[in-house]
Amino acid sequence: MPNGYWGKILRVDLTNKKISEENISEEYCRKYLGGVGFAADILLKEVGSEVSALDPENRLIFGVGPFQASAVPGSGKFVVVARSPLTNAICYSVAGGNMGPMLKKSGFDSLVVQGKSDKPVYLWITDGKAEIKDASSLWGKNTEETTDLIRDELNEPKATVVDIGPSGEKEIAISCLTVDKASFAGRGGLGAVMGSKNLKAIAVKGTQKPEVADSQKVRDLAKELNKRIRETAPEGFLKGGTTSETTPTEELGDLPIKYWKGDSGGVWVEQAEKLSYPYYSDELNVDLAECAKIACRNCPIHCHRYIDSKEPARFAVTGVGPQYEALGMLGSCNLVEDIHAVAKANEICNLYGLDCISAGAFVAFATECYEKGLLTKEDTFGLELKWGDGDQLVEVVRQIAEGEKLGKLFAKGIVKAAEQIGGDAPKIAVHVKGMDLPAHDPRAFFSLAVSYATSSRGACHTHGLCFKAACGLLLPEMGITEIPDRFNMEGKEVIAAKFHDLSAIQDAATQCNFMMFGGFGITDMLNTINAVTGWDMSMEEFLKIGERLSTLKRAVNVKWGFSKKDDVLPEAIFIPAKEGCRAGKIPTPLEPAIDRYYELRGWDNDGKPTPEAMEKLGLS
Ligand code: SF4
């Protein structure tokens, strides 16, 4: 068994109620690293194009990597992977809480769930054992109630609980997974995959530790990196988490305004300040001690927000507060500047188990369709949709979460909703491969245009932190040593590809990518992996894993019918702003940059990995 791994994948077949273990070799671990690497390999081998996302034969895979055998910063993460009901493509969603370390301590490197139970169940995994337990009484409960009830039933108050809410049970295509009430595997509707299997939750508690090659070195690295992050991460980020980003993001023209039709870049800055730290912290009574309690394990940053807001009563929230993506998509994207309304809408998403990014996008899309006469009062069940209305935001988000009234229209995602509305609605919808854009605008950072178009899971900010390069986040180990011009397409295929590779490594290792903001670089990642495993992996071999996993994920999508035709951006992104710092700027010419991206990877003109590229990466 390799150091840092158990060499074991836990398999659960819910149809046959069969639990088994599969052994994996050290060679396999070194080739795919863990997390999304193991998962993409499993999907490629086991899920054919005929298996839809909600088919029992889809696999729902939870993975960790060598980082979870350590306490280095950001190692509180795990990744969940499956075919997505929103995009039909591969989807990987990273979350935290305590699940990553607990899954590792339970004696497994991955958990693969297949089949469908004949009644609601949950899994209880502890120290090398797994049990399928009845969850009939939990069906219909929200995510917080479910977590509490499972911990009570097991008499394990410290068990980590990953669960779905009523949205996932109804298989709503933007349902998420919630971890320990405070962290979310948000994107791509993987909560619906879990619901389709009648799997309400997974509870895990482990007390075992895999062998580590050089435990003193791992401890020293953890100590040094924690100190470095505390000393070098931006002060605003340490105090306000991602909520400190709303105002600067607006100033860069990156914040979505009015479903991508409004200008930003110094145009909406006063309103953005009301959705940003420090106003956010004062208004919602952020409690930093409570933020630390709900942070992911092994984190020096504590970005999650714990709020205690009592007024106005209809928007009162005590618990987890919105982060930047929610502030952008529920807030500015809908022209809602009332932080209390955004916090309430976000709470509904959390309790029902709904992706707040897509939920915000749906409300904004519906409002634009209503404004253009594509939706009528009859379609909206009497609502007169208008921009900037906090009460309307809360009501429509609730309907989406419940899959009722106007929410029914969105139950299968933005593409199906736009088709059903008809007329110009499909042209208005802002998505890539069916995934609603997150709160970062490719008109502000042209590398994002290439990144969103070619990303295997659709429009994805965590798979495309490439925009941070233009803000000074360089990757010298990957050859990105200079701050790029954010407003031209030259070389943007390289930046997009390198950041895709990096995120593939982070999702395999498995680590929170925010640690990079505190100087946790690629060399530190490699040093950690070598200290944990005892390998003498070179930087060249390490970076090749990123290339391998990027092409592997693409190969999964190609097997399921994806090609160049799917690598397109929505029309809204080619409408230039009239005012602000990105006035007149649009990310063109995009297609040649996408072609160069394919060429760089050794994919053919249709975006399919060639046999030579597969062989070079050991994937044939
Ligand atoms: S920075 Fe935030 S997301 Fe990352 S590990 Fe810490 S609490 Fe979790």
Image: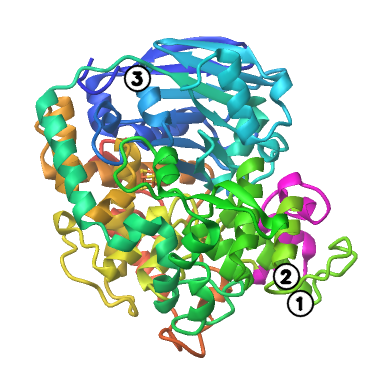
| Disc nearest the viewer among 2 and 3 | 3
Q: Earlier in the sequence, mark 2 or mark 3?
A: 3
Instruction: Give the amino acid at mark 1.
Output: Glu
Magenta stretch encompasses residue 177: no
> Can the viewer see residue 257?
yes
How many numbered circles are shown? 3
Q: CB atoms at circles 2 and 1 under 8 Å apart?
A: yes
Mark 1 lies on a secondary structure that is helix
Vertical order, 447 against 350 (above or below): below
Please give the range of residues in magenta: 400-428
Q: Residue at x 34, y 47 (%)?
A: 550
Q: Residue at x 30, y 56 (%)?
A: 499
Magenta stretch: dominant SS? Answer: helix
Q: Which mark is residue 105?
A: 3
Question: Residue tagged by mark 2?
Answer: 367
| Disc nearest the viewer among 3 and 1 | 3
Q: Could you tell me which quadrant the N terminus lies in?
A: top left
Q: Which mark is residue 371?
A: 1
Location of residue 449 by image quarter: bottom left
